[in-house]
Image: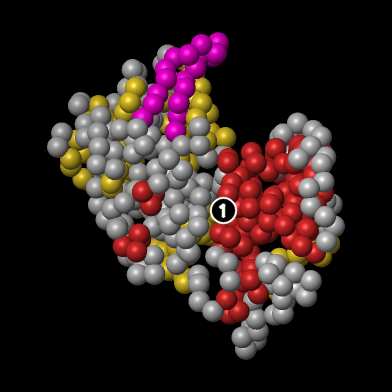
Amino acid sequence: MVNYLSAAYTYDGNGLRVMKVSSGTTTVYIFSGGKVIAEYDNSALVGSPSREYIYSGSALLAKIDSTGTKYYHRDHLSNRLVTDSSGATSAQMGHFPFGESWYNATNDKLLFTSYERDSESGNDYAKARYFMSRLGRFSSSDPLSGSTSNPQSLNRYDYAADDPTDLEDPSGLCPYWGPFGINGRVICTSAHGPSGRDIVDWLVVFDYSGWVLGGEYAYPIATYTLVPVYGPSYAYFGGGGGGNPGGTDRIAKVKGLAEWKVGENEKCRKFIEQLLAKIYGGVPGQGNSNATTISSGILNSTYTYSETPNTGFPDANMMATGPSSATIYPPGAELSNQGLAVSFIHEAIHGVTGRNDRQIVSAMNGGRWTYPNTTEGIAAASRTWGGQLRTNCE
């Protein structure tokens, strides 16, 4: 138990806050994975929770309490609008970049990203630690040390790499774009959250010890392991004395990251669905213009590594060799996992749609051909739409 001014907090063995006593009210929290699904005030009966929460994946959809059902509508960061069962507006919420309240007439505690704001302190409960929006910093240091190759990570109090308008940190350990599941574990790219264009120095592998993740994020867990991500690029793809070469592991991680970007990164997903709609002449998000077709393409594709550059396009990172296969060339091996994941998405779009670079750019330009059918023209077309893909997905 931890006492804070007039409040007392109780945590379970996994570090989750399961009870709070404040202003004469005792609240017990019931979790599913890392999400609160019910709250009981002052010994409420088991069958009569004070509040229940309904989710779709990681997103909060609704809260049920004594006043009825309220539906939450959020943007890429936080809840912005609450409506009742008839669709009427119950509340509107807004905050400044680091979470300080701008307008919140109903004092809804679910104001900033996925955090619960404590009325007794004004701090946000961020699972691993507490966030102080008035300072734009966490109240305690990151339990993991930083790396000199990424100076930003040496600041163990900063929030989401000081990029609060693009990233969120649901666990208090890593930004929103980081977590994705592989082989029964949760991999979080860089606990300290460099921006998408920085090299990630570490993978933080959390052992969830029996947690039911269900697509959930990694929250404070008993053990973690630091695994270096970068070093000689070829170490991740080449031989290495038998056994399971590192290339298999890195490809699996990058595939998982690419799938996560397409399915969970809203900016990336919307760009892909708009692109598919232009290619197919459909409606973004519907039918074959749904981004899930690209996620499936990534999942079902085979990626292999070539130690020699592509003879026709020596600067190529990757190139599709079929509807569900692609070759990674040396420039691709030199990319960060974030960058290589975008290349996976790039080639999956080729494989799924059957369109080459010139055809994709033509579709983006309303059917007009803008590049000649030459080596230089094809490379320029690839850079044109591929650059937009990186801007939206990396």
Residue 155 in which image quadrant = bottom left
In-front residue for pair 4/110? 110
| 193 over 127 or under it: above or below | below
Residue farthest along the left direction in this orientation: 5
Name the residue tied to disc 1: 394
Instruction: State left or right for residue 7 relative to residue 146.
Output: left
Tell me the residue at 18%/40% (across/down): 4
Which quadrant of the structure image shows residue 322? bottom right
Q: Is residue 234 magenta?
A: no
Judge from the rendering whether residue 221 lies leftward or rightward of residue 302; answer left or right. Answer: left
Q: In this view, does 42 lie to the left or right of 362?
A: left
- The number of discs equals 1
> Residue 90: image x %, image y %?
44, 14
What is the x, y in percent for residue 393? 59, 49
Residue drawn at (58%, 49%) of the image = 391
Amino acid type indicated by mark 1: Glu
Based on the picture, tell me whether residue 89 belongs to the magenta stretch.
yes
Residue 325 at least partly seen: no
Q: Main secondary structure of the magenta part?
A: strand
* Range of residues picked out in magenta: 78-95
Q: In this view, does 5 lie to the left or right of 84?
A: left
x and y percent of residue 326 in the render? 76, 65
Q: Residue at x 36, y 48 (%)?
A: 162
x and y, in percent, of residue 293 in the image = 75, 46
Residue 89 vertical position relative to residue 281 in the rendered view, above or below: above
Residue 106 to residue 363: above or below: above
Q: Nearer the viewer, residue 356 or 62?
A: 356
